[in-house]
Image (tube, rainbow, N blue to C red):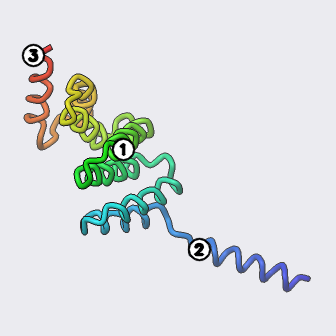
């Protein structure tokens, strides 16, 4: 009986050590993303956020994979999933500037410019020295000057 118990403990420890980390999934997703294999990237990112459900970077990566899938297919469901993932990233970390800019850009370029402004403004509050800050300010000014 004792040998069986020890064997079970060893089996559990070994199998736990073989589990992939969220970071591993995110890295694999990034490799697929770079290769233009968006379905596989999405799958890896989904596994990653399942393991790390509070990962703002993970949801941001997933959102970007959905964005590229939308561009590839034109299917609105991917745009909706992109927005949902980016919102989740911001929910996990309200100051995560990459997701703020990405969601702002998504709204801006999908014609919902008024919805873009709060995200873009907040992104500049968090990261005022962003390399594209001037371009982001132009987007904000364009919307505010036409309302």
Local secondary structure at mark 2: helix
What residue is pinned by disc 3?
145
| Residue at position x 16%, y 40% in the image | 130
In the picture, the quarter occupied by the C terminus is: top left
Mark 3 Cα shell of 10 Å, populated few (<14), some (14-19), many (≥20): few
Q: Position of residue 14 (x, y in %)?
A: 64, 78
> Gap between marks 1 and 2, in whole Å?
37 Å
What residue is pinned by disc 1?
77
* Quadrant of the image occupied by residue 6: bottom right
| Residue at position x 21%, y 37% in the image | 105
Tell whether label 1 touches label 3 (CB within 8 Å).
no
Q: Position of residue 83 (x, y in %)?
A: 35, 39
* Disc nearer the start of the sequence (1/2): 2
* Quadrant of the image occupied by residue 96: top left
* Disc nearer the start of the sequence (2/3): 2
| Residue at position x 40%, y 39% in the image | 84
What residue is pinned by disc 2?
17
Closer to viewer: mark 2 or mark 3: 3
> Gap between marks 2 and 3, in whole Å?
56 Å
Local secondary structure at mark 3: helix
Whether residue 20 sits left or right of residue 85 in the image: it is: right
| Residue at position x 42%, y 63% in the image | 44
């Amino acid at each position: 009986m004792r040998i069986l118990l020890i064997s079970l403990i060893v089996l559990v420890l070994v199998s736990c050590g073989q589990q992939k980390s969220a970071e591993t999934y995110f890295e694999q997703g990034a490799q697929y993303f770079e290769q233009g294999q968006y379905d596989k990237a999405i799958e890896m990112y989904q596994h990653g956020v399942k393991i790390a459900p509070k990962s703002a970077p993970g949801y941001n990566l997933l959102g970007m994979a959905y964005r590229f899938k939308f561009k590839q297919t034109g299917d609105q469901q991917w745009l909706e999933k992109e927005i949902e993932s980016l919102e989740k990233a911001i929910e996990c970390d309200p100051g995560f500037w990459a997701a703020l800019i990405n969601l702002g850009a998504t709204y801006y370029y999908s014609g919902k410019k008024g919805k873009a402004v709060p995200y873009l403004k907040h992104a500049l509050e968090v990261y005022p020295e962003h390399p594209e800050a001037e371009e982001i300010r132009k987007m904000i000014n364009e919307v505010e000057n036409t309302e």
